[in-house]
Amino acid sequence: MVSADNSEYDVDLTVTLTEAPGAESRVFHLRSAAGMLSPDPDALDSNLPDAPAALAAVEQFGEEIFFPEPRPDRICTQQYGGPQVAVVKGWFRGRAVNSQFSRTDGCEIARWKTLATLLGNSGGSTGAV
């Protein structure tokens, strides 16, 4: 991966998605320069199922998701949304990203849903009965 200083991209993220323990991981990329994805749909620059929606979500919520402010008063519901785990690494607007996403409680499920298009849009459990 290229350092932020040398990258031609302002968003350069690699997502490793594992659907279940022991399952083979899938790798996705999201790369954009000045808010524009590669015009070649077959390029490895952005191979997510819905790269434009993933870029829109990252542009809107990336700062608060990747670099959250500490909130000691935060209360998370104890619910299980599924075994999926996603690791996001790379660069977002010149800042290094190394975030893990899971569906282990209400707060983590909310983070997952916010960036679902970046994470490969895996459904997991909806919690519906």
Image (cartoon, helix red, strand yellow):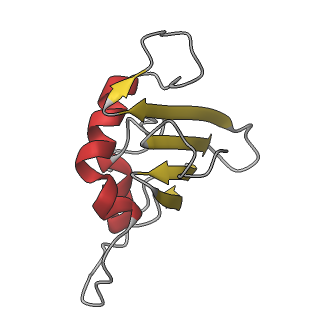
**Residue in the foreground of this view, choosing between 11 and 75:** 11
Where is residue 22? Give x, y as percent. Answer: 76, 47
Asked where in the image residue 32 lies, by quadrant, the reply is top left
93 displayed left or right of 85? left
111 displayed left or right of 21? left
**Residue in the foreground of this view, choosing between 118 and 110:** 118
Where is residue 78? Give x, y as percent. Answer: 37, 72
Q: Vertical placement of 102 versus 19: above or below?
A: below
Q: Residue at x 50, y 36 (%)?
A: 8
Asked where in the image residue 100 lies, by quadrant, the reply is bottom right
Q: Vertical placement of 80 versus 40: above or below?
A: below
Q: Residue at x 48, y 34 (%)?
A: 30
Q: Residue at x 46, y 36 (%)?
A: 122
Q: Vertical placement of 84 versus 50: above or below?
A: below
Q: Residue at x 57, y 15 (%)?
A: 43
Where is residue 5? Give x, y as percent. Answer: 54, 52
Which image quarter holds the N terminus?
A: top right
Residue 71 showing in the rendered view: yes
Where is residue 29? Give x, y as percent. Answer: 55, 33
Residue 129 showing in the rendered view: no
The residue at the far bottom in this view is 72
How many callouts does the rendering have?
0
